[in-house]
Amino acid sequence: MAAFFHFIFTLLFFSATASTHGVVRETNNPADQLVAVLNSNRTSHKGTSLYSNPGLACIALQYIKAYQGSCDAVGGPDAKKPAESEFAESFAPNCGVVSSTLSQITGRLLGCQSKYVPPSEAFSEILVKDEKGLQILYDKNHTEVGAAVTGTDGGSPYFWCVLFSSGKRNSSFALEGGEAKISRPGCFSGANDECSGAWRQPLSLWLSIAAALIAAAFAFVS
Ligand SMILES: *[C@@H]1O[C@H](CO)[C@@H](O)[C@H](O)[C@H]1NC(C)=O
Ligand SMILES: *[C@@H]1O[C@H](CO)[C@@H](O)[C@H](O)[C@H]1NC(C)=O
Ligand SMILES: *[C@@H]1O[C@H](CO)[C@@H](O)[C@H](O)[C@H]1NC(C)=O
């Protein structure tokens, strides 16, 4: 119960911070939050802050979709990986990324679990939880990053994917017409996309109601 209260207050705090600083878009999108956590971790370890590339992030979402909701295929003995050729054949066209601007992928972090956790927890407990994860995170070859998260069919399991690239900011994963193709379900970073996708809406709505009730309860007892 204490954890639940803590969660509610964190949520209230975030809503309050978001509205006072006018950064609602950033804080509403878990993929953008994950990139923020990742970059602040890199800079606190004397690394560079990576450019948040929406084209690369959209491809990270396609990468997740290639798993078709199969968590078991992510790690462990049955681990699978989409074929290299899929980047040019399906991921890029689905995102409106110009194929000739596809650049080298220098690392990836991928995780899946049945429970939805906030981005900071996904970072430390799913994606960067061991020495191998840290090595990928701090690799000096990365110049840009794209992150995505999605629930399958609007619910569990939840997949998180971070792709790193050594591409040049202006000429890699370029989007046709300069705009990212937003596809649901799922959220990806860098596109100024608010991403209150259908799979998050009912939960946040429910939490707002719960928070309001708890606030009311506190008003009664104090
Ligand atoms: C960076 O992330 C790693 C892995 O989650 C964690 O062990 C470390 O404490 C983080 N560093 C900072 C400064 O948050
Ligand atoms: C970084 O890039 C260089 C040159 O492309 C390559 O030789 C090296 O293996 C890369 N390092 C890592 C950690 O990927
Ligand atoms: C790269 O993009 C930045 C803005 O994102 C722009 O200011 C700069 O002129 C661009 N550089 C080139 C070489 O196109």
Image (spheres, rainbow, N blue to C red):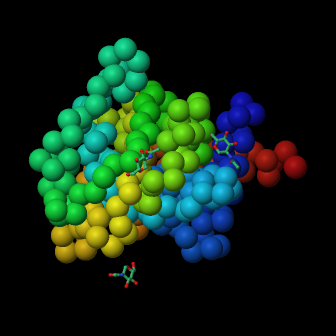
Q: Which part of the image, by quadrant, shows the N terminus?
A: top right
Q: Is residue 191 visible?
A: no
Q: Position of residue 222 (x, y in %)?
A: 87, 49
Q: Position of residue 196 (x, y in %)?
A: 41, 55
- Which residue is more in the foreground, 95 or 11? 95
Ligand 3 is found in the corner quadrant, namely bottom left
Q: Position of residue 124 (x, y in %)?
A: 60, 38
Which residue is painted at 44% across and 39% down in the image? 109
**Residue 167 left/right relative to 131:** left
Most distant residue in the left direction: 89
Most distant residue in the top direction: 77
Which residue is painted at 28% across and 31% down in the image? 81
Residue 176 figure quarter: bottom left
- Which residue is more in the foreground, 116 or 103? 103
**Residue 68 left/right relative to 123:** left
Residue 58 figure quarter: bottom left
Which residue is painted at 28% across and 57% down in the image? 103
Q: Is residue 16 visible?
A: yes
Q: Position of residue 177 (x, y in %)?
A: 19, 74
- Which residue is more in the foreground, 80 or 122? 80
- Which residue is more in the foreground, 123 or 222? 123
Which residue is painted at 34% across and 61% down in the image? 167
Most distant residue in the right direction: 222
